[in-house]
Image (tube, helix red, strand yellow):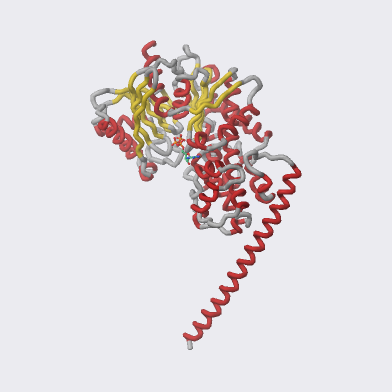
Amino acid sequence: MEIVAAADSDERGLSLLKVVTVLQKVVVFVHSFTINKLRKHTSQISSTAGTSTMPDMREEDISTKVQEICQSLILGEELMREVCDRMEEEINKGLSKDTNPEATVKCFPTYVRDLPNGKENGRFLALDLGGTNFRVLLIELGDKCSMDSRIYAVPQPIMVGPGDGLFDHIAECMASFIKERDLGDEILPLGFTFSFPCKQEGLTKARLACWTKGFRCAGVEGNDVVELLKQAISRRGDVKIKICAVLNDTTGTLMSCAWKNHNCRIGLIVGTGTNACYMEKLEKVELWDEDRNDPPQVIINTEWGAFGDSGCIDFIRTEYDNNIDRESINPGRQLYEKMISGMYMGEIARQVLVHLVSQGLLFGGYSSDILLEKGSFFTKYISEIESDKVGDYNNCRNILEELGFNDATDADCANVRYVCTCVSRRAAYLAAAGVAVLLNRINEESVTVAVDGSVYRFHPHFHNLMVEQISHLIKPGIKFDLMLSEDGSGRGAALVAAVATRIAAIR
Ligand SMILES: Nc1ncnc2c1ncn2[C@@H]1O[C@H](COP(=O)(O)OP(=O)(O)OP(=O)(O)O)[C@@H](O)[C@H]1O
């Protein structure tokens, strides 16, 4: 009796399932029919409007609803100028003695007072820690620069484990590099590129202010990272080096470019994180309490990734930015960085895509499990999708297949591309706002900005978008160019060490 009843209810369940499946199909059909109608309607509206703010794509392919949802990511001229004004205010706060303790853009003086003259020479070691990989480099400066380097992974448990573990790992990689190249007998000068916010107290003393970019090693914040490195080296006892300088990758980028380009005054990174440094007149650096002799200037490491942590750019932040911040390992911190850099851009795009799906505006309203996973939409996908020619969705389709969407329509692809375009354009414009503020401060007739980082390097339009926006925001009469700076963290570190040695020899 019981068994029959169970079979009965199973059958009823199955029939119910069939009805639900048919209903779902009807809903999907009606839904995509409605969306297509809506798209046709939108394309008429757009073509009569005759304007396109996205020259690299056909805006008429994008539904009004999708455009409305992405509107919060679009920054018009007025907003951009407001961002610049607030960045200017925050930099002034960072440089002034009274306001620096509460400032979010810390503007740390780097103790690098001079740029290379192009005649630097010798052999140097460099360590580069600050993002996705850790590298050890051997650099030979002369007429040309030759470099030998090796990349070492920093395993995730080390990134969030005890500080000693991190520095032991660095020392171990360095020891194996030195051994492999038989450099044991030479005491080589070393530049340590450590690209996290540090308060420098000298050219070889840098206290970590706070970890960023996914690192969180205990016992390092507040301590001198050069000292921690020295301790790790002495724990091993098999490495002989002379640490000549600790620097940030922005400084390395600026120095590396300035080696041959004497107009270079700004270093910019748009990679895992974002940051910039620039050459500032000492008279504007109230914080500076060392000698004010020639040269009366110092490179300032702005640490602008933290711009907005005071709430001053909340007026442009979106629900997607809030979600990303909330789910990050450093909520409330590095808010400007979280809108710009490679660690977050893909995730911003994913958040928007998931929202569009939930509104029934993408993929017939059905997501894939992969798209719902945090971090599944890589920032490099944005570059790849935007590299497709207008109207061609080759890369886009491949990526969507990787994400579990095998039947994406052209309209889906156009919408995905539109989202990517909005996210990358906003990132490029925001980075441009910061650069424009620095150019206006420097106020020289012609300035080269040295840029590094995979987002700037590989995104197909990032450079052009930045140039376009900087041109709008700088004072008339200033000329600038953005130059890809090759290997700031290696060659730049060697150059800082070389310039420091030169200055020390003169004094
Ligand atoms: N093709 C690409 N287009 C856009 N972004 C990319 C691309 N490839 C990698 N990225 C992003 O660039 C970031 C890595 O940048 P980069 O290679 O400059 O690393 P890094 O030197 O470790 O970072 P940082 O300079 O901030 O310390 C990652 O977040 C990654 O998502």
Q: Is residue 246 left or right of residue 344?
A: left
Q: Decide: is 130 above or below 291.
A: below
Q: How many marks?
A: 0
Query: Closer to the camera, 424 or 96?
Result: 424
In the depicted structure, whether residue 484 falls above or below residue 347: above
Query: In this rendering, does residue 325 appear at all?
Result: no
At a point 36% along the width and 40% down the height, the residue shown is 153
**What residue is shown at x 63% (from left), y 27% (from top)?**
471
| Rendering coords of residue 479 (x, y %) | 60, 21
Residue located at (36% from left, 36% from top): 151
Which residue occupies 68% across, 46% down? 60
Q: Is residue 463 left or right of residue 164?
A: right
Residue 68 percent coordinates (x, y) = 68, 48
In the image, 118 versus 345, the foreground residue is 118
Place of residue 46 in the rendered image (x, y in percent of width and height, measured from the top left): 72, 45
Q: Position of residue 349 (x, y in %)?
A: 56, 46
Q: Residue furthest right?
A: 48
Residue 435 in view, yes or no: yes
Viewer-side residue, 321 vs 444: 444
Q: Is residue 140 left or right of residue 14?
A: left
Figure quadrant of residue 443: top right
Q: Quadrant of the C terminus?
A: top left
**Residue that sits furthest to the bottom in the current view:** 1
Residue 299 position (above or below residue 366): above
* Residue 27, quarter of the rendered image: bottom right
